[in-house]
């Protein structure tokens, strides 16, 4: 395999890793607004000058920061333009100055949209990964018990699964979301416990097929107990397809979490999430379209990227199902 092909296959995983590590570059201070009156609703690619002023107030850390559009030297002091209004500063009052570019603009309170996106990536992707892990554990347990257990257990579990599949997932998620206090853990459990049914069906089908395999019959002939056959031979051999399905569920979990955050039923707290950012900008779509547009693009791109990762894992594990290989 050529190096170029290997790089193309590894690219989706690299991008997801960068999204998870990006908040290490943009610290929490970058999310907080600087001079909200002057930095609010800045369009993308806006460049401003940050002036650190000496206020002489020790209780307020001795300084404050102004956001200005233009700064020029005027005699022994400085002249600046701030939101269409001019002002002057003495040389003694100005501690420091530096430029800052808002690559994706700012929101209504002056927060950097790019910093919000990167911090929201960690929250949204982490919830997606943990929700998929919960679905994988529950689905594998139910599917393994249904496929390897007695017939009455199989019939009972399949009827329960059919009943759950009769309801749209979003309806189940909303019903559960209104019963629990918004928190990241609640969102992980709600999304995970409403997403395991497809994995359970897949694991059950694999177990039923593997029960008649030669290595399983040989293990039974050598005296292996039923529990040992299930834990040592059946479930490990269903891990490949189940892992692919769980990978694809990460993207679905991100969508569901974003929908909950958009409706105000998400993780709660002050941590930014993509769905919450889309909701915050829906009232300014005409004059400040970037507040909702960029988080929406991030959600779409990440979901497509996760599905591409699932296809790559399927090809590496040699899964023949065309729906998994994409």
Image: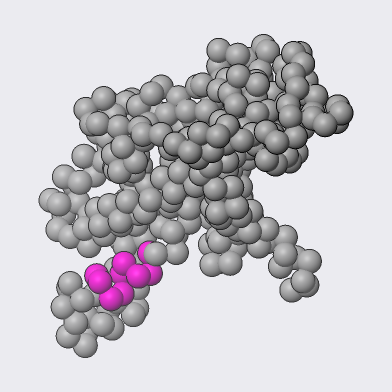
Residue at image point 37% right, 47% down: 131
- Residue at 32%, 26% (x, y): give it: 174
What colour scheme has been applied to the protein in the rendered image? one colour
Instruction: Say if the magenta span includes residue 72.
Output: no
**In magenta segment, residue 231:** yes
Viewer-proximal residue, 221 or 129? 129
- In the picture, residue 262 is in which quadrant? top left
Near-viewer residue (156 or 191)? 191
Q: Is residue 122 visible?
A: yes
Give the residue drawn at x 36%, y 60%: 206
Position of 18 relative to 265 (above/below): below
The residue located at (73%, 39%) in the rendering is 97
Q: From the image, give the main secondary structure of the stretch colored magenta.
A: helix
Q: Is residue 224 left or right of residue 57?
A: left
Q: Quadrant of residue 147?
A: bottom left
Q: Where residue 204 sits in the image (x, y, percent)? A: 31, 55
Report the side of 42 relative to 126 (left or right). right
Of residue 239 and residue 108, the one placed in the foreground of this image is 108
Which residue is the extreme one toward the bottom? 222
Residue 151's spot in the image, x, y percent?
A: 16, 54
Residue 251 % position (x, y): 50, 43
| Snapshot quadrant of residue 312 | bottom right
Task: Return the x and y of residue 209 as percentages of the image width and height.
Answer: 35, 63
Question: In the figure, 144 relative to 152: above or below?
Answer: below
Left or right position of 125 against 136: right
Can you say whether 94 is above or below 84 in the image?
below
Name the image quarter holding the N terminus: bottom right
Q: Is residue 3 left or right of residue 62?
A: right
On screen, residue 262 above or below 17: above
Name the residue nearer the viewer: 142 or 268: 268
Magenta stretch: give its range: 230-238
């Amino acid at each position: 395999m050529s190096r170029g092909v290997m790089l193309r296959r590894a690219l989706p995983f690299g991008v997801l890793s960068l999204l998870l590590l990006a908040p290490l570059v943009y610290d929490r201070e970058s999310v907080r607004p600087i001079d909200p009156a002057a930095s609010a609703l800045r369009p993308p690619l806006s460049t401003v000058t940050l002036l650190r002023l000496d206020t002489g107030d020790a209780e307020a850390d001795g300084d404050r920061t102004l956001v200005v559009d233009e700064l020029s030297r005027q005699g022994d002091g400085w002249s600046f333009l701030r939101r269409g209004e001019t002002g002057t500063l003495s040389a003694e009052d100005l501690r420091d100055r530096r430029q800052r570019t808002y690559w994706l603009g700012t929101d209504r309170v002056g927060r950097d949209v790019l910093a919000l996106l990167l911090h929201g990536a960690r929250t949204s992707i982490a919830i997606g990964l943990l929700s998929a892990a919960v679905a994988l554990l529950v689905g594998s347990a139910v599917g393994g018990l249904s496929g390897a257990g007695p017939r009455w257990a199989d019939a009972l579990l399949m009827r329960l699964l059919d009943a759950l599949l009769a309801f749209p997932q979003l309806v189940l998620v909303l019903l559960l979301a209104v019963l629990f206090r918004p928190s990241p853990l609640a969102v992980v459990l709600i999304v995970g416990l409403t997403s395991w049914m497809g994995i359970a069906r897949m694991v059950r089908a694999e177990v039923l097929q593997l029960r008649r395999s030669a290595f399983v019959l040989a293990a039974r002939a050598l005296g292996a107990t039923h529990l040992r056959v299930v834990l040592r031979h059946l479930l490990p051999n269903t891990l490949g397809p189940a892992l692919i399905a769980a990978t694809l569920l990460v993207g679905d979990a991100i969508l569901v979490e974003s929908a909950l955050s958009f409706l105000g039923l998400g993780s709660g707290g002050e941590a930014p999430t993509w769905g919450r950012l889309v909701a915050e900008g829906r009232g300014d779509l005409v004059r400040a379209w970037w507040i909702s547009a960029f988080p929406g693009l991030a959600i779409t791109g990440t979901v497509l990227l996760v599905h591409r990762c699932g296809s790559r894992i399927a090809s590496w594990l040699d899964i023949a199902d065309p729906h998994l290989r994409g």
